[in-house]
Image: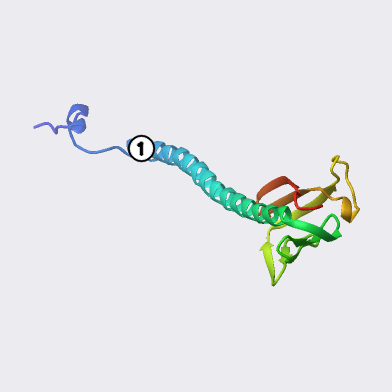
């Protein structure tokens, strides 16, 4: 009786995967996961950058709004220069805004001293007469431009606002 050998047809009826098929599946899965992780990483980075920019923008807007509101109430100035201003408001309160280069703290001094922001990396005040020529004379100031740069981490925001002084006689 002759010895029978398994033929190719009978061997292929055995269920399972070959080593090459398994390796191909792992390689293709790895490529798909690598592409997906790059896309997810970009999405997460954009999300967290957006959160940082929003927080920084909110802080800058809050500081600018407070300074604008109080400067609009100014009736006289005692000190004006590019990094600080001292003035008296219409209700008699004395207020000073001070920023010392290179920062990062912008301070408001009034009844009590308090930091307005601790991420200010640039701050400049420019004073104008009624004809919008710049001035350094206390009595001639009719408008002030506030130029402020805030930086936190890799995010930077610059805000510029011009305040027109209506209470100065």
- Residue nearest the observer in this picture, 89 or 157: 89
Residue 153 seen in the current view: no
User: Outermost residue, front direction?
Assistant: 169
Q: Residue at x 72, y 56 (%)?
A: 73
Q: Position of residue 2 (x, y in %)?
A: 12, 31
For numbered disc 1, what is the local secondary structure? helix
Between residue 98 and residue 22, name the one nearer to us.
98
Residue shown at the point (44%, 40%) measured from the top left = 36
Residue 130 in the image, given as x and y percentages of width and height: 84, 43
Q: Where is the N terminus found, in terms of image quarters?
A: top left
Crowding around mark 1 (Cα neighbors within 10 Å: few <14, some 14 to 19, many 20+) is: few
Relative to 54, 70 lies left or right = right
Q: Can you tell which quarter of the image residue 74 is in?
A: bottom right
- Image location (x, y in percent) of residue 108: 72, 64
User: Is 91 above or below relative to 164?
Assistant: below
Residue placed most toward the observer, 78 or 4: 78
Q: Quadrant of residue 8?
A: top left
Residue sitting at x 54%, y 44%: 46
Q: Which residue is mark 1?
A: 25
x and y, in percent, of residue 41 in the image:
50, 45
């Amino acid at each position: 009786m002759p010895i029978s050998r398994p033929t190719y047809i009978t061997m292929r009826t055995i269920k399972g995967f070959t080593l090459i098929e398994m390796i191909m599946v792992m390689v293709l899965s790895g490529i798909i996961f690598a592409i997906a992780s790059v896309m997810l990483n970009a999405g997460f980075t954009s999300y967290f950058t957006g959160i940082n920019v929003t927080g920084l923008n909110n802080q800058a807007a809050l500081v600018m709004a407070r300074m604008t509101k109080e400067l609009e109430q100014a009736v006289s100035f005692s000190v004006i220069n590019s990094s600080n201003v001292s003035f008296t408001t219409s209700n008699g309160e004395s207020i000073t805004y001070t920023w010392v280069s290179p920062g990062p703290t912008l301070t408001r001094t009034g009844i009590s001293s308090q930091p307005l922001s601790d991420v200010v990396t640039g701050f400049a005040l420019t004073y104008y007469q009624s004809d919008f020529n710049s001035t350094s004379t206390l009595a001639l100031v009719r408008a002030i431009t506030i130029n402020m740069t805030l930086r936190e981490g890799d995010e930077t925001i610059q805000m510029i606002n011009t305040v027109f002084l209506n209470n100065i006689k």
